[in-house]
Image (cartoon, helix red, strand yellow):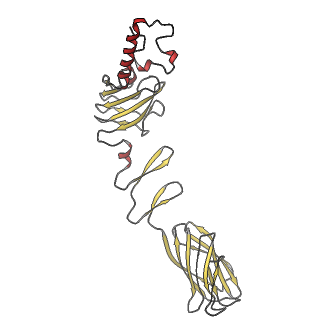
Amino acid sequence: MADVSANLKDWSATASSNNPAGGTTIGTGLDDNLREIQKVVRQDLATKGADIAASATTDIGAVAGFFHDITGASTVTNLGTVSAGIWKVLKFESTPVIVHNATSLILLTGANRTTANGDVGIYVSEGSGNWRELSFFPVTGGSYIAPTLIDAAGDLIQGSAADTAARLAIGALGTRLHSTGTLAEWQATWFKVGTFTRDTSLASGTQAVTGVGFTPKAVIFFAAVDTTSRFSVGFADGTNSYLITDREGIAAATWRVLSTFSIEMVTNGSDIYQGEITTLGTDGFTITWTKIGTPTGTATIFYLALR
């Protein structure tokens, strides 16, 4: 007669806790023990066990075998108690509801599920009556999670919280993927073209330009006082400003490069009007103007704001 326990769930991960004990005389029972070990390994790791009827406590650990058919449609709230590390593959033969529990029956979706005839799930015991679903395969094919997230070609999956996934539907034609800082989203507008004016006789001060519709990353400016030689091209990102400006009023056919402003209107060496972006806001930007001398005329500024 074999001294080895007849079920894998009764074996211990501690050698000294298993049978036969150190003082047991093996004798002619050695062959029985060897055969029993082979039976247990085959029985609990590579054999289809008996069918198990679905019930509130569907005690899968009490039935020898690695793979079982679950019959009947009763609601399942618990899978019984067995030592941690025992795996079971279950094929559902009907439509029982498996009730998710964050401790005792942890399902992949974190929600209850109604199974279908032919669905297969893999579960592992965490001990003390607690089980975790490792995988679930609907009879329709694929994995359980993907069909619930992917609805159309081009859909993406992104993390929406810790250990949580969410579907991001494919964007419209011409849109681009954009980060909000926490999630990805599709953006249709990546730039804004606009215009505004500034009376260069006004004192130094600020001017808010709104209606952009987003917070720009950078802005390109083309500025001029109509019917004069006063003209500049510049750009800024809220920190850095650069421009090329016409210096015709100071010296014929000359230009100047600056790295402190993005707009400049030069009447002569004494009368100059300069602007730079000092704030990038959610709907545009603010320009701080600096007046030198007594310039006159209204500057028209065309801009290209980039998202």
Is residue 154 found left or right of 246 in the rendered image?
left
Q: Is residue 211 visible?
A: no
For residue 140, above or below residue 28: below
Name the spot of residue 60 as percent of width and height, x first. 38, 24
Residue 174 falls in which quadrant of the image? bottom left
**Tag count:** 0
Residue 133 falls in which quadrant of the image? top left
Residue 118 falls in which quadrant of the image? top left
Q: Is residue 158 visible?
A: yes
Name the spot of residue 88 as percent of width and height, x first. 38, 28
Name the spot of residue 71 as percent of width and height, x first. 29, 27
Residue depicted at x 65% and y 81%: 274
Foreground: 212 or 26? 26
For residue 230, above or below residue 186: below
Residue depicted at x 38% and y 54%: 155
Is residue 149 found left or right of 288 in the rendered image?
left
Foreground: 13 or 284? 13
Foreground: 13 or 60? 13
Foreground: 115 or 60? 60
Is residue 217 found left or right of 137 in the rendered image?
right
For residue 67, above or below residue 146: above
Quarter of the N terminus within the rendering: top left
Residue depicted at x 63% and y 81%: 257
Name the spot of residue 166 as percent of width and height, x first. 44, 49
For residue 293, above or below residue 63: below
